[in-house]
Image: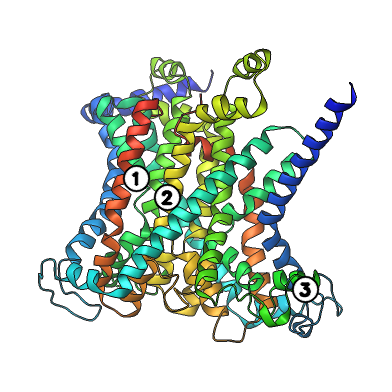
Amino acid sequence: MSDRTPAAERAGAMAARGHRLAFLIDRPQWLGPLMIGPAVLYIALVVGLPFCLALYYSLTDITAGSRALHFVGLKNFIAVVGTPNFQTALRNTFVFAVGSQVLVIVLATVLALALMKDFRGKWLVRLLILLPWVAPMSLGSIGWLWILDSIYSVINWTLQAAGLITEANWPMYLGKPYLAMMSVIGVHVWRLLPLATVILLAGLTSIPQDIHDAALVDGASFSRHLFQITLPLIRPIALVATLFGLVFAFTDMIVIFVLTRGGPYDTTQVLSTLAFFTGIQAGDLAEGAAIAVFLFPMLLAVAVLFLRVARRTEVI
Amino acid sequence: MAVRPSVRRAAGRSVHAGIIGAFTLFSAFPFYWMLITTFKRTGDLLKRGNNPFIYNEAPTLENLRVLFEDTLYGRWLLNTAFVGVVVVAITLVLALPAGYALARLTGRWGEQLGIGIFLTYLVPPTLLFIPMSRLIAILGLQDSLWSLVLVYPSFTVPFCTWLLMGFFKAIPPDLEEAAMIDGHSRLGAFVKVVIPISVAGILTVIIFSFTLVTQEFVYALTFISTASQYTVSVGVPTFLVRGDVYFWGSLMAGCFIASVPIAILYNFFVDRFIAGFTVGAIK
């Protein structure tokens, strides 16, 4: 209490000096915009501006070396859509994103339900399960690069030792078309599982205990309790987890960049990696931007869905 | 009669243990494998018949020596720390007042603006990196860590503003009102009363911003091409993985050192982070 008086005196002196300014700052309708302004301005400059530029570039013929750029309308889009590369990448993007998200949400539900129970060493299990989410993705992927190595894969060594495979038919996890896609999906699931699990766990803990008690008293069976009470109650929050996961999966390029670089034969090429290879490595900024812009309608759909869910369930 | 429920309970318990065990193995195995590989001799690693789970030859520190003496790994760690610290500072300066304003000072439009800011977190680098590379070139920041310092707040500020907003909302307004009655301005009350009791929230923001910086990959890969300017998350996969010759021991050491310690620190703050993600769905 005692230290407030000198502070108040100082504040009073300041107010006397900059009377009009302090008067303005003290009014919520001025102070609010003043405090939030810098953040909004920064975001507008580093997110809004490049976003508009991405749309603009996709309509021009800009390249990395060029000074001048010309407006070419939808030419890039038309050119891009016609290429087999793009069509493969688009299909792969959906396979990668939807495949990994279905797995993530199913596995995360199982894991979250298992983590609801108390057991010894739970804190350690939680820490270990969270590791893939917290560790830098590019480094985690390199760990998998070694685990899935074509010659020294520890998985293959174990399978061989167990007599399940022979050296003649060792699976080349990253070198065979379907297997490579399954591998990158698997690694992506590994990465996103912790986030979805913790979100679902938060949802499960928020269900009031008396609902479970009531179900128990009424003699609901385990499956009935699970499918007709618990799971419907966590549906809104499961949707939130899925939407976040979809955004990450549709736009991620780290797993694929590190593990396969889009190969073999473009079978794991997705829109984000294709945009990188076209726009940055080959220097065709316009076409790269056009490819990246194809992600936008999908993200918009996710955002709209997110807001609708949020409204309906009063999440926000 | 008493047997059946107890048998069922035992079966349930082992299924439960099996599920937990399988998931823990799946999540943690790559990190365990990094750690094992770190201390293995190259000859041991590359002999096909060797059991990979044990040390067939005596463990060695050679891989760590190579990593720190013969590569730029140490430099990359410093680069990452530098970018992390500056980005955290920028994030705090921008997100603290913005979060407070959204929590207290703005009405309906502020709420809309808050949701808008949060949604920009969902705009991915994949959509922005191509025009951003051009802007960075125009500013003359290619190959400079400052390009990352400039761009990384684009994803730390939205999320941290949102996180802090929730945090400030939980502080009873009476505290500031008391300070204002004592003669503080609203701003003075924010600086002298609200910030000191928000240490936990500020610490959370620091940890998250820092981990987001260490994880970032796409921008660093796009803007930087000089080996000495890389951050860890890009330097290791692009510079240590070259051609067909892999130095797996050093590579795995590099991955382990840069991921596990910060993960353990982060673990203490994860509940707050989730509260941010679920945007108050849980009361």
Residue toward you, A123 or B264 = A123
Amino acid tagged 1 = Val
Q: Quadrant of residue B131?
A: bottom left
Residue annotated with mark 2: A246
Give the SS element for disc 1. Answer: helix
Residue annotated with mark 3: B39
* In-image side of A24 versus A222 (left or right): left
Chain letter belonging to callout 2: A
Of the numbered discs 2 and 1, the one sitting upstream in the chain is 2
Residue toward you, A296 or A127 = A296
Residue toward you, A6 or B146 = B146
Locate residue A193, reporting x and y percent: 57, 49
> Within 10 angstroms of label 1, few (less than 14), some, or many (20 or more) residues?
some
Gap between marks 3 and 2 measured at Cα: 38 Å
Q: Are marks 2 and 1 on the same chain?
A: yes
Q: Are marks 1 and 3 on the same chain?
A: no
* A72 in relation to B245, above or below: above
Q: How many numbered tags mark residues here? A: 3
On-image quarter of the N terminus of chain B = top right
Label 3–label 2 contact, CB within 8 A? no
What colour scheme has been applied to the protein in the rendered image? rainbow
Label 2–label 1 contact, CB within 8 A? yes
Label 1–label 3 contact, CB within 8 A? no
* A30 in relation to A106, above or below: above
Residue drawn where x is 43% and y is 21% of the image: B176
Amino acid tagged 3 = Phe
Residue drawn where x is 44% and y is 26% of the image: B169
Residue drawn where x is 29% and y is 53% of the image: A47
